[in-house]
Each structure stands twice: as structure tokens, then as C-alpha cells.
Image: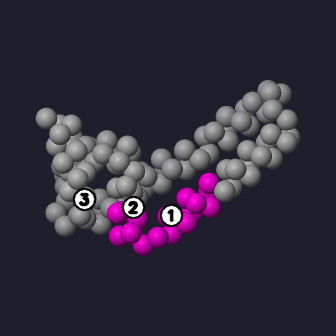
Amino acid sequence: MTAKGSPQLTKRQWEQALIDAYYDYRWRQILEPLYEKFKRWDAGELDHADMDQAIHETHKETRKAYSLFTESKSMLVGMIQWDRDWFIPWLKDHHPPPGVHVDPLILDELEEEED
């Protein structure tokens, strides 16, 4: 099952769902702090220099994210698993179909949490 009660996805569908969810997560991590700073700037709490620095820092992070998401699908699926704090909760509701390699240590952690 993928999400509770849903039919099993194919390997390709599961991998794409993983990438899409992680893509959204990473971009939110990068852009939401900038959004909050824009609101503070609009309220007069930050000046143009503060915003210039915030935009510069965000740009550096967006380049890293872009680099990550231009990897091959198989490489990206493996790399996403390294972010255990994000991946394990996602995996609880999106069990992998046959043929998907999940790090055995992650599966052990998942089983321990479910017990």
C-alpha cells in the first residue's frame, strides 16, 4: 500500500512521488525563510541591505537544490534516503513497491518505530 488504503504504485510511480514530495519539501525549506523576511521588510523591520543578504543566501541554497534535482532519478532516490528525518516519516505512508531499493538500516529504523 502507498498511502493508507491506496493501491500499490509501480516502482516508477513511487520514485516519482518520492521525488515530487521531496522537491516540495526542499524548496519550502529554502524559500519560506525568504518569504518571512520579505514580510518583515514590508513591515519596515528589515532594510534593503538585509534583504540583499537574504536573497544572496537563498540564491546559494537554490543552486544546491538545483544541482541535487538534476541528478539521475536512481541517484536522487538514493540520496533522498539520506535525509532520514524526512524520509522515514514519508516512508511510513508510502511503502515501496517490489524492486525499489531502500537502505536496510532505514527499514530497520522503520520497523522499530512501528513496534
Q: Which residue is mark 3?
A: 102
Q: Report the residue at 80% width, 39% height from top.
A: 50
Q: Residues within 10 Å of mark 2 (few under 14, many from 20)?
A: few
Provide the residue span drawn in magenta: 61-79
Q: How far, Cα to Cα, is label 1 from label 3?
A: 19 Å
Query: What is the x, y in percent for residue 86?
Result: 38, 45
Query: Which disc is residue 115 wearing?
Result: none
Q: Which residue is mark 1?
A: 68
Count the numbered circles shown: 3
Q: Is residue 17 visible?
A: no
Quadrant, the C terminus: top left
Q: Quadrant of residue 104?
A: bottom left
Q: How far, Cα to Cα, is label 3 from label 2?
A: 11 Å
Residues at marks 2 and 1 touching, judged by CB atoms closer than 8 Å:
yes
Residue 12, relative to residue 86: is it above or below? below
Q: How far, Cα to Cα, is label 2 from label 1?
A: 9 Å
Asked if residue 54 lies left or right of residue 28, the reply is right
The kind of residue tagged 3 is Val
Query: What is the x, y in percent for residue 17?
Result: 36, 56
Query: Can you name the residue that lies furthest to the front here?
Result: 105
